[in-house]
Image (spheres, rainbow, N blue to C red):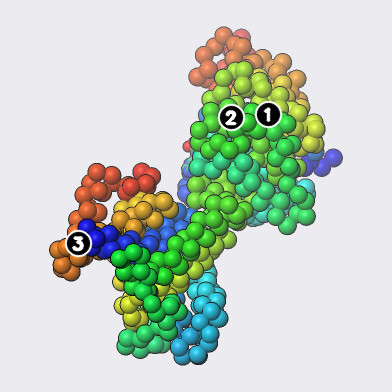
C-alpha cells in the first residue's frame, strides 16, 4: 500500500506534465480547429532554446528561461503567420497534414542545429528529492510537477479572465460572430499559437530536466495526443484530468506489471473509454469535423 | 441628401456560380430605420452579409456594384474593421456565445471600440434597456431563452456604440408579446442613441410600423419600395406581406403584377 501511494504520486506528477503538454494542443484546437501534430517538436525546440541560453551561452537559468519563452513565442507566432495563415479556409485534413510536415521539418532542423546527440539540461531544481512522510519523489519529477501546475493555472486564468482570453473563447465558439463584434480573428489565432508555444516551452524545460534532451523528444507529444483525445480535443478540464489519469496509469502498470505494459495499458484504457464516449471525457460531439 | 449607407446595383454570387442578388440598390438615411422585407430565401441575409463584409467567409463575392458607408467605399473592408467604424450587424439566429456568461458576451463586443478612443457603453446602460439581462449576467448564454438571447444579441450591439445597425430578423421564433417588446426597444435605441438601422424582417407589419421607408425584395431584386405608410396602404403589399389579403401566400408580388396586367389586357 505504501508503494501504491508513492508510485501514484510520481505518476500523477508526470501526469501533470502531460496535462501541460495537452493544454497546448487544446488551446490551438479550440481556437483554430487545427490538430497540431508539430506540438511535440515545438516543445522540443523550447528545450533546445533553454539548453542554448543556459548551457551553450552560460546565462543564469532565470534569464535563460525568460529568453526561451520569448524565442518560443516568436516561433509560435511565426508558424501561425507563415505556415497556417495561408491555409485559412482549406479542408481540415490538408491543414493537419501540413502540421505533420512541419513536425518533420522541426525534427530535421533540430538535428542540423544541435546535432542528434544527447544533452543534459543544466539543473534548475534543488538536488534533494521531495520526501513526504515515508514517500520519496525524485526532485525533477516533483518540482517539474509544481512548475507544470503553476503554468496550467496561469494559462487558465489568462484564458478565463483576461479580455483577450474572453475574445479567444468567443472565437473558439463562433468565429463569424466574434469577428462581427470587432474581434480580429487571425490575431486570436496567433495568440493561441503563442500560448501553445509558451506552454510547450515550459513543458520542454521540465521534460528535458527529467530525462535527457535529443531531437526525438518531440515523440512524447504524440503519446500526449492520446491524452488529449481522451480528454476531448476541445476541453481544457478534460486535458488536465486525462493527463493525470494517463500519468497515473503508466506509473501503476509500469510498477506492478513491468515496463513493457507501461506503454500499452493506458492506451487500452483510452480505447475502451473512447468506445463508451467517442468525444472523450469532456469533448463536444462536433469533433468529427476532423 | 447623401445617405449613411448606400448600396448601389450590387450583384452577389456564391461559389462562383450561384447568383443570389441581381442589381440590388437601397439606401439608409442618417438616423432613420429602413425595413428590408421579403420571404425566406429572397436574399435579405445575403444583402446584409454583402454590406458587413461576410461574403468571403461563405465563399461568396460581390461581383459588381458598390457599397458606401458614410460616403466611403467599404466593399473590400474586412468585417472587424467595419465594426470598429460603427457598422454593426446583429446576425440572424442571435449567435450568442453559448459557453460564455452574459457579461462575457457583452465584453467581447467591446472589441468593436478598439482604436476608436471611445469607451464601450457601460453594461449598466445595456441593462437599463434589458433589465432581465442584469439578473442573468452571470448565467451562461446557452441557458437563456430565445427572447433573452435576442436581448443579449442587441445588448452586444449597444456596447459597441454603433452608428448603423444591421438587424437580421430579430423577431425570428419569438412569441408575439416578446416581439413587441424587442421592437419597442429597437425604436428606443434608434431615437435615444441616434443609431441608423437597416431592419431585415419577415414580420412586415411590425417592421413597417417602425420604419420610415421600406424595400421589398424577391429573388435578389427590389420589387417595390417606398415610404412605410405608402407600403402599408399598398393593396399588393397588404395581400402578400401583411397577411391581410384573401389569396394564399404561395404566389409572389411579381405574379400579382402579371396577373393584373393580363386581366387588364383581357378586359
Ligand atoms: N453560403 C451560401 N452558399 C450558397 N447559396 C447560398 C448561401 N447562402 C445563401 N444562399 C442562397 O441564397 C439565397 C438567399 O439566401 P438568404 O440571403 O439567406 O435569404 P433570406 O435571408 O432572405 O432568407 C437562397 O436561395 C440561399 O439558398
Ligand atoms: Mg435570412
Query: Disc 3: which chain?
Result: A
Mark in the foreground, 3 or 1: 3
Which label lies toward us, 3 or 2? 3
Q: Which mark is residue B131?
A: 1
Gap in angstroms between the C-alphas marked 1 and 2: 10 Å
- Residue A177 position by quadrant: top right
The residue singled out by tag 3 in the image is A253
Please determine whether, in this image, residue A72 is positioned above or below residue A195.
Answer: below
Residue B27 falls in image quadrant:
top right
* Residue with the mark numbered 2: B148
Tag 2 subunit: B
Q: Nearer the viewer, residue B227 or A183?
A: A183
- What distance separates the C-alpha of mark 3 from that of mark 1? 57 Å
Q: Residue at x 18, y 69 (%)?
A: A259
Q: Look at the numbered discs 1 and 2 and tell me whether their residues touch, using CB distance below 8 Å.
A: no
Q: CA distance from mark 3 to mark 2?
A: 52 Å
Residue B60 versus residue A215: which sits nearer the camera? A215
Disc 1 chain ID: B
Amino acid at each position: 500500500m505504501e508503494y501504491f501511494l508513492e508510485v501514484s504520486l510520481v505518476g500523477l506528477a508526470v501526469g501533470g506534465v502531460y496535462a501541460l503538454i495537452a493544454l497546448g494542443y487544446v488551446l490551438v484546437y479550440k481556437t483554430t480547429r487545427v490538430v497540431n501534430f508539430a506540438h511535440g517538436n515545438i516543445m522540443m525546440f523550447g528545450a533546445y532554446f533553454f539548453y542554448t541560453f543556459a548551457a551553450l551561452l552560460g546565462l543564469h537559468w532565470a534569464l535563460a528561461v525568460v529568453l526561451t519563452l520569448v524565442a518560443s513565442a516568436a516561433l509560435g507566432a511565426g508558424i501561425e503567420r507563415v505556415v497556417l495563415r495561408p491555409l485559412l479556409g482549406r479542408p481540415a485534413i490538408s491543414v493537419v497534414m501540413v502540421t505533420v510536415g512541419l513536425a518533420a521539418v522541426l525534427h530535421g532542423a533540430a538535428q542540423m542545429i544541435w546535432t542528434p546527440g544527447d544533452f543534459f539540461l543544466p539543473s534548475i531544481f534543488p538536488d534533494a528529492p521531495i520526501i513526504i512522510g515515508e514517500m520519496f519523489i525524485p526532485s525533477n519529477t516533483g518540482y517539474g510537477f509544481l512548475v507544470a501546475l503553476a503554468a496550467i493555472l496561469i494559462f487558465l486564468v489568462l484564458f478565463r479572465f483576461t479580455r483577450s482570453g474572453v475574445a479567444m473563447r468567443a472565437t473558439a465558439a463562433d468565429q463569424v460572430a466574434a469577428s462581427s463584434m470587432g474581434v480580429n480573428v487571425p490575431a486570436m489565432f496567433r495568440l493561441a499559437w503563442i500560448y501553445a508555444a509558451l506552454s510547450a516551452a515550459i513543458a520542454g524545460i521540465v521534460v528535458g530536466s527529467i530525462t535527457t534532451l535529443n531531437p526525438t523528444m518531440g515523440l512524447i507529444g504524440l503519446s500526449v495526443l492520446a491524452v488529449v483525445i481522451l480528454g476531448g480535443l476541445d476541453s481544457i478540464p478534460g486535458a488536465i484530468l486525462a493527463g493525470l489519469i494517463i500519468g497515473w496509469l503508466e506509473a501503476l502498470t509500469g510498477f506492478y506489471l513491468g515496463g513493457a505494459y507501461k506503454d500499452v495499458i493506458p492506451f487500452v484504457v483510452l480505447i475502451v473509454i473512447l468506445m463508451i464516449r467517442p468525444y472523450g471525457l469532456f469533448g463536444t460531439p462536433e469533433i468529427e469535423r476532423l | 441628401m447623401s445617405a449613411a449607407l448606400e448600396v448601389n446595383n450590387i450583384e452577389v454570387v456564391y461559389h462562383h456560380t450561384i447568383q443570389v442578388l441581381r442589381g440590388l440598390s437601397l439606401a439608409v438615411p442618417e438616423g432613420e430605420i429602413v425595413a428590408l422585407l421579403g420571404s425566406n430565401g429572397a436574399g435579405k441575409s445575403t444583402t446584409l452579409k454583402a454590406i458587413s463584409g461576410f461574403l468571403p467567409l461563405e465563399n461568396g463575392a460581390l461581383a459588381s456594384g458598390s457599397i458606401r458607408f458614410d460616403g466611403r467605399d467599404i466593399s473590400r473592408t474586412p468585417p472587424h474593421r467595419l465594426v470598429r467604424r460603427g457598422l454593426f450587424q446583429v446576425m440572424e439566429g442571435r449567435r450568442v456565445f453559448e459557453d460564455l456568461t452574459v457579461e462575457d458576451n457583452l465584453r467581447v463586443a467591446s472589441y468593436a471600440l478598439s482604436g476608436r478612443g471611445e469607451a464601450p457603453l457601460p453594461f449598466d446602460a445595456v441593462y437599463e434597456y434589458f433589465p432581465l439581462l442584469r439578473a442573468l449576467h452571470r448565467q451562461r448564454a446557452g441557458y437563456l431563452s430565445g427572447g433573452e438571447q435576442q436581448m443579449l444579441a442587441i445588448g452586444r450591439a449597444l456596447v459597441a456604440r454603433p452608428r448603423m445597425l444591421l438587424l437580421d430578423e430579430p423577431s425570428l421564433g419569438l412569441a408575439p408579446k416578446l416581439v413587441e417588446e424587442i421592437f419597442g426597444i429597437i425604436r428606443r435605441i434608434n431615437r435615444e442613441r441616434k443609431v441608423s438601422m437597416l431592419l431585415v424582417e419577415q414580420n412586415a407589419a411590425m417592421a413597417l410600423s417602425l420604419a420610415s421607408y421600406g424595400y421589398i425584395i424577391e429573388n435578389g431584386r427590389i420589387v417595390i419600395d417606398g415610404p412605410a405608410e405608402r407600403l402599408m396602404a399598398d393593396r399588393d403589399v397588404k395581400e402578400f406581406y401583411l397577411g391581410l389579403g384573401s389569396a394564399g401566400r404561395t404566389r409572389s408580388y411579381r405574379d400579382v403584377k402579371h396577373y393584373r396586367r393580363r386581366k387588364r389586357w383581357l378586359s
